[in-house]
Image (cartoon, grey):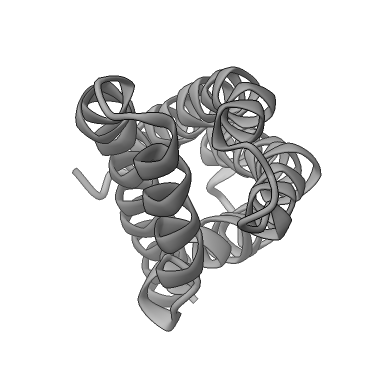
Amino acid sequence: MDIVRIAALVAATVTTGLVTGVFYGFQVSVLIALREVDDRTYVDVNQRINRVIQNPKFFLSFLGSVVFSAAAMVLMFGGDRGSVLLPAAIGFGLNLVAFMVTGGGNVPLNRQLDEAGAATDPAVARQRYERPWTRLNNVRGWLHVGAFGALCWALIAYGAV
């Protein structure tokens, strides 16, 4: 059973770290670079990013962060690893909230931007999208950072590090 518990914790930590890195990378590079482009380019690039990010590699880390942290938390019930339950539960909770922020905020904005066709003024489309999407990206990014920290704490508490 210990190998299953540690595997779930490691998978949760790795997938959370990967998705955290994606959102951090966006914040510190992609979003900064896109501030400097014209409205049409901004809309086109974001529409393309929103389409290509929907791929198995991204979904493995994004969905995996929630699924594996839930599994890690559940596996910590009972047994002699009670000190790991709290950080595992925090990691799961933060990953779940970040998932809900993405699903309830970023994804609808992505769809709205994607539906902005050639007839839509790119300046209007950008205005409706950029600030709220960036704010939500910051929120989910920090939630994932917290989840990653909690899962690292869980690994230490487990004695795996």
Choose between 36 and 139: the one closer to the eye.
36
Question: Could you tell me if residue 78 is visible in this image?
Answer: no
Determine the residue located farthest toward the front in the rendered image.
Answer: 119
Task: Look at 63% across and 33% down and name the residue there.
Answer: 94
- Examine the rendered structure and indicate whether residue 3 appears above or below residue 137: below
What is the x, y in percent for residue 161?
Answer: 19, 43
Task: Look at 35% across and 43% down and name the residue there.
Answer: 41
Question: Could you tell me if residue 47 is visible in this image?
Answer: yes
Position of 61 with respect to 67 (left or right) is left
Q: Which of the 4 quarters of the picture holds residue 6?
A: bottom left
Determine the residue located farthest toward the bottom in the rendered image.
Answer: 56
Position of 90 with respect to 4 (left or right) is right
Query: What is the total number of numbered labels drawn onto the structure image?
Result: 0
What is the x, y in percent for residue 134?
Answer: 51, 24
Choose between 28 and 69: the one closer to the eye.
28
Task: Look at 28% across and 29% down and name the residue there.
Answer: 37
Task: Look at 48% across and 22% down and name the residue there.
Answer: 142
- Examine the rendered structure and indicate whether residue 113 appears above or below residue 25: below
Choose between 41 and 109: the one closer to the eye.
41
- Examine the rendered structure and indicate whether residue 130 appears above or below residue 156: above
Choose between 26 and 72: the one closer to the eye.
26
What is the x, y in percent for residue 140?
Answer: 56, 31
What is the x, y in percent for residue 2?
Answer: 42, 69
Q: Which of the 4 quarters of the picture holds residue 121?
A: top right
- Examine the rendered structure and indicate whether residue 79 appears above or below residue 106: below
